[in-house]
Amino acid sequence: MGQVVRALGEKFDLSGLDGVTLAVDFNQALLDLDRGYETTYKLAATDSHVVGVAMTPAVLRDGNLKSHIILNAGHIWPLLEQDDAEGQAHAIHVLAHECGHVEVTRAFDLCFPEVLLRPSNGSVLEQIQWKVIFAVWDEFAVTSITAGIGESQTESYENAFLTDLALADDRSNKLILGYRAHLPVDQILREIYDCYGDVLKFSAYHLGNLEGLGVRWLDSEKTASILKDHWFFPYFERLETACLEIAKNYGKWENKDSFTLITDIVDDLVERAGLLIEAMEDDDRLWVDIPYTPETDPLLQ
């Protein structure tokens, strides 16, 4: 593993690497990671239609932002098996992807120090929006710079995106139905942004990988045929444009304006889902109206 990471260090900027943890118990390793600051947030692997096998969280070390790679050992073990070319290709891509995260996080931190993992002074809505921005941009950037290294991810990224898209509206409607019972507005706000933030994140995996391979998504037959008459088509096009605009000044950003193009997209998706958000005058509070629809009225279910 060390040999592979050192080789990848010739391609990616790993100056922000804190360390690498290879764990048999991946979930416990995520919980045990010392992130260098007090937080109640618990790291957890993705466990839905996509299963996470590695993660590269940001940490603070002596006031400096670093990235720590944590790997599920079961997916790296094939590096020791000389006759398992397929398993080795998979392991190499996993390592490359996480090393890509180290570089992309470092590039952002160099341009905007004292932002990641630092206390935010923005409104609750701005904090939620930036959570989406970071997730979407990171995956677009990482998949674009790691495309073609080791195992091909083109089919899996496409399937993950299309699966999440197919589930999103039903997931959103169920969350709003839950809100009718539990009522906290801040909870439903985060949940719906997470829901459509995931759609954009999985879109970004797919778009970034194709960009890195030099393939137009319109030439991806499955994606093109499904999106042709789909409501998500214009949002997908807008996301590609936004990510490419951010990528133009990769590592040389002078401000965060291009990143907020992603905000505009997720805000529109949240409004489409049924959350009408309006800033209240003279303070940071929000007015959130969630009108009843046939899909989100408990009496019609």
Image (cartoon, helix red, strand yellow):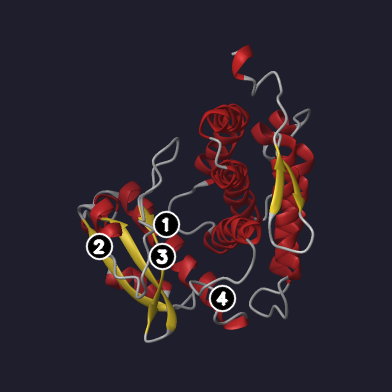
Amino acid found under the numbered disc labelled 2: Asp
Amino acid found under the numbered disc labelled 3: Pro
Q: Quadrant of the C terminus?
A: top right
- Secondary structure state at the residue bearing disc 3: loop
Report whether residue 241 is seen: yes
Of callouts 1 and 2, which one flags the residue occurring earlier in the amino acid sequence? 2
Q: Which residue is mark 4?
A: 115
Specify the quadrant of the image occupied by residue 159. top right
Contact, mark 4 vs mark 3 (Cβ under 8 Å)? no
The disc label shown at residue 209, or none:
none
Mark 2 or 3, closer to the camera? 2
- Secondary structure state at the residue bearing disc 4: loop
The outermost residue toward the bottom is 62
Contact, mark 3 vs mark 1 (Cβ under 8 Å)? no
Q: Which residue is mark 1?
A: 93
Question: Spatial distance from mark 4 to mark 2, Cα to Cα?
Answer: 24 Å
Mark 3 or 1, closer to the camera? 3
Question: Spatial distance from mark 4 to mark 3, Cα to Cα?
Answer: 15 Å
Q: Position of residue 279 (x, y in %)?
A: 76, 54
Q: Position of residue 136 (x, y in %)?
A: 60, 55
The disc label shown at residue 57, or none:
3
Q: Nearer the viewer, residue 32 or 93?
A: 32
